[in-house]
Amino acid sequence: MIPFHTKDNPLLDICKEVGGRHKHRVPITDSTSGTPVCTGIISPSGLVAFIASKCPQGSMEEKMMDAGLPFRKDVVKISDDASAASAFELLDSKRLSGIAVVDEDGKLIGNTSARDIKNAVMDAGRTGMDMDILSYLAQVRQSQVVKNDRYPSCHVHEDATVGHVVNMLAKTGFHRVFVVDKDMKPIGVVSFADVINFFIDKGE
């Protein structure tokens, strides 16, 4: 981690550090002593929430494709009948923080993330990981006293506006939203880093 001083570093530099190197946290230190500021941590989710609250509404009314927000990417996905163990192994092998869960027709019906692996660890093996991924998640998330509606399938359609995507990320705290076509099949992803880098490019 590279510490940033509260007065010496512009916000744009911090955005570049978070978006460019995919850091999850950037600590803020006192410019004189170098000691960490108690509440001085900037996260990607914090930056996206800041963008959502400060950008003029007109600047976010363009559709993603018209504005140049990158979203068309290969989507790593797993079938809804795959086991939880298989889903988590895929997450680990691809070094991703989240993957799409699709039905037999390839339609997006859910997602799983690194947060679910944490829940699995806390579950301590009480729920069998040979269960299909969606059933497993329903049980483990419930066992963590987390309502299922806090984990909706976070998606937008390809004609969504930049503002819609940014506000969804800001409000849900998800690290990514999946982009789907008219048939609900995932065709891309927009991450925190994509949004941060998009606004860096717009500002330069």
Image (spheres, grey):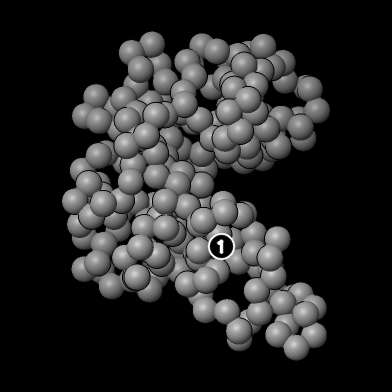
Does residue 150 sit above or below 102 in this rendering? Answer: below
Q: In this view, does 150 lie to the left or right of 186?
A: right
Query: Relative to 5, is 196 on the left or the right?
Result: left
When the figure is inspected, residue 162 is found, relative to residue 131, above or below; the finding is below
Query: What residue is rendered at 66% in x and 79% in y?
Result: 5
User: In the rendered image, is residue 142 in sight?
Assistant: no
Q: Is residue 38 visible?
A: yes
The residue lying toward the viewer, choosing from 124 and 156, is: 156
Q: In which quarter of the image is the C terminus?
A: bottom left
The residue at 63%/37% (across/down) is 114
Measured from the top left, where is residue 31 in percent x and y?
Answer: 70, 85
Name the spot of residue 41 as percent of width and height, x first: 66, 68
User: Could you say whether the residue bearing mark 1 is in a helix, strand or loop?
Assistant: helix
Q: Quadrant of the N terminus?
A: bottom right
The one of 88 and 121 positioned closer to us in this rendering: 88
Which of the pair 184/192 is nearer the observer?
A: 192
Residue furthest bottom as drawn = 32
Residue sitting at x 52%, y 71%: 13
| Position of residue 202 in the picture relative to residue 31 (left or right) | left
Image position, residue 178 (x, y; %) = 39, 37
Residue for point 46% across, 23% down: 77
Residue, disc 1: 17
Q: How many marks?
A: 1
Classify mark 1: residues with Cα within 10 Å, few (<14), some (14-19) or many (20+): some
- Looking at the rendered structure, the kind of residue marked 1 is Glu
Q: Where residue 34 sits: x, y (%)?
A: 77, 80
- Location of residue 32 (image quadrant): bottom right
